[in-house]
Image (tube, rainbow, N blue to C red):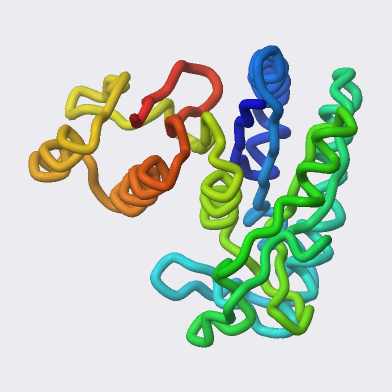
Amino acid sequence: MKTTVIKIGGNAVKKSAKEFIGFVRRALKNSRVVVVHGGGPEVNAWLGKIGLKPKFIDGVRYTDAATLDVVVMALSGKVNKEVVSILERAGIPSAGISAADGRTAVCRRVKKLGLVGEPVKINVRLVSAISSAGFVPVVASVGADSLGRLLNINADVLADALAREIKSSRLVYVTDVAGVLDLRGKVIKKITLSSSAELAQKGIITGGMIPKIRSAFAAIKMGVGEVIITDLKSHGTTLS
């Protein structure tokens, strides 16, 4: 059966709950759905409450032991259950796990980032079992190394890894913009591998969107059907 993997931030779920629910309902009509979430603002808020400042290296969160405690608490606990609650209240059966559960994501530690993991092995048995039982798996971006020690994972990276292993028909990145925008601020409806190079050359694709699009086409090469970048309020940009 087809599978749609949706990556979304915890705050985005709450801010766009109606659109999120509608998107999941539409996807469920012809595919299974797996939701992968982060929750950076929630983590930052809790770090502030205990007097710690967030630290980033090249735009990626540096995670020491104290920060990891907050990440696990915020993502696997509060944010995960809030996303499940939003879906359940809408009548969509859901079950929350982290990528550490069932060894869903076994990671290699990225030492320069502290206790951050990069998935090296994805096990979809637990996610598949939850889906087969009629629930939407809601996966927090917390994984573990080969010895079971918890690690923080970038949610985009986790969603990409899961989508590749599942060979999902669709991978959706929910962002704070409507899609990839042209120089007039209009959404580009479709991008191919060849057109993406031209768009980058013209300065239309810049900054953090460049690695996201590279990763998207790498995922497509590995068997993912298509990748969509959207804010859920528009059709977004389809990469195929």
Q: Nearer the viewer, residue 113 or 53?
A: 113
- Residue 165 vs 89, above or below: the answer is below
Instruction: Please give the name of the residue rendered at 85% of the width and 52% of the height, measured from the top-left corner.
Output: 78
Q: In this view, does 230 lie above or below 34?
A: above
Q: Where is residue 113 in the image (x, y as percent from the top left)?
A: 52, 80
Residue drawn at the location 39% of the way across and 40% of the way down: 220
Answer with left or right where residue 94 lies relative to residue 196.
Answer: right
Where, by quadrant of the figure, is residue 98 drawn?
Answer: bottom right
Task: Please report the residue visible at 52 percent of the width from the left and 48 percent of the height from the top.
Answer: 164
Question: Which residue appears farthest toward the front when viewing the image?
Answer: 1
* Position above or below: 90 against 239: above
* Lateral position of residue 227 relative to residue 163, left or right: left
- Picture mark count: 0
**Residue 211's x, y, as percent?**
33, 54
* Quadrant placement of the N terminus: top right
Q: In which quarter of the image is the C terminus?
A: top left
Tell me where residue 114 sits by quadrant.
Answer: bottom right
User: Residue, x 27% and y 20% (percent of image)?
Assistant: 186
